Image: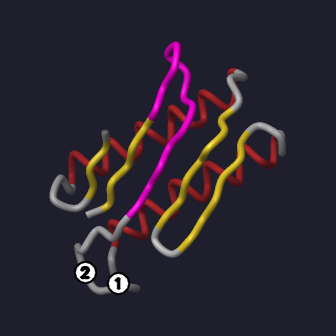
Amino acid sequence: MIKVVVVKKDNKYCTISINGHAMYDDFGKDIVCSAVSSIVITTINGILLLNSDSLKYETSQGKVIINYISDDDITQTLISNMNNMLKELEESYPNNIQIK
């Protein structure tokens, strides 16, 4: 299962951790993992294209940690959109992705 942990302070996103494998299908064929990867990578790349100082992240095998998120409106809106898309995915695949 993919586990997403979202930390907010004063109603602003601070840290997001995404870890695991959805186990919907084999590695390389898993549509849930593919959707999560696409949502997260597109969001990170879009934010960094607008302002390279607006977030910091780390990646490793099966894990992404966004450990700094600027509190500017554009960054917060794009992260909120990412979170909403992940929640929609969770509604469709509750056995494969969990958001806390």
Q: Residue at coordinates 43% horizontally, 37% vertically from top-left?
A: 6
Secondary element at image label 1: loop
Bin the neighbour count of mark 1 within 10 Å (Cα to Cα): few under 14, some 14-19, many 20 and up: few
Q: Is residue 60 above or below residue 64?
A: below
Looking at the image, which is closer to me, 68 or 98? Answer: 68
Q: Estimate the x, y position of residue 33 in percent, counting from the top left.
A: 38, 68
Q: Residue at x 61, y 49 (%)?
A: 43
Magenta run includes residue 12: yes
Residue at 44% from the left image edge and 55% from the top image edge: 18
Residue 64 part of the magenta-drawn span: no
Task: Please give the range of residues in magenta.
Answer: 7-19
Q: Main secondary structure of the magenta part?
A: strand
Q: Nearer the viewer, residue 40 or 15?
A: 15
Amino acid beneath label 1: Lys
In screen coordinates, is 70 left or right of 8?
A: right
**Residue 9 shown left or right of residue 95 in the figure:** right
User: 41 or 21: which is nearer to us?
Assistant: 21
Q: Where is residue 95, by image quadrant?
A: bottom left
- Placement of 21 over or under 88, stated as above or below: below
On residue 29, the disc is 1
Q: Which mark is residue 93?
A: none
Marks 2 and 1: CB-CB under 8 Å?
yes
What residue type is disc 2 on?
Answer: Asp
- What residue is pinned by disc 2? 25
Displayed quadrant of residue 42: bottom right
- Residue lying farthest to the top in this orientation: 10
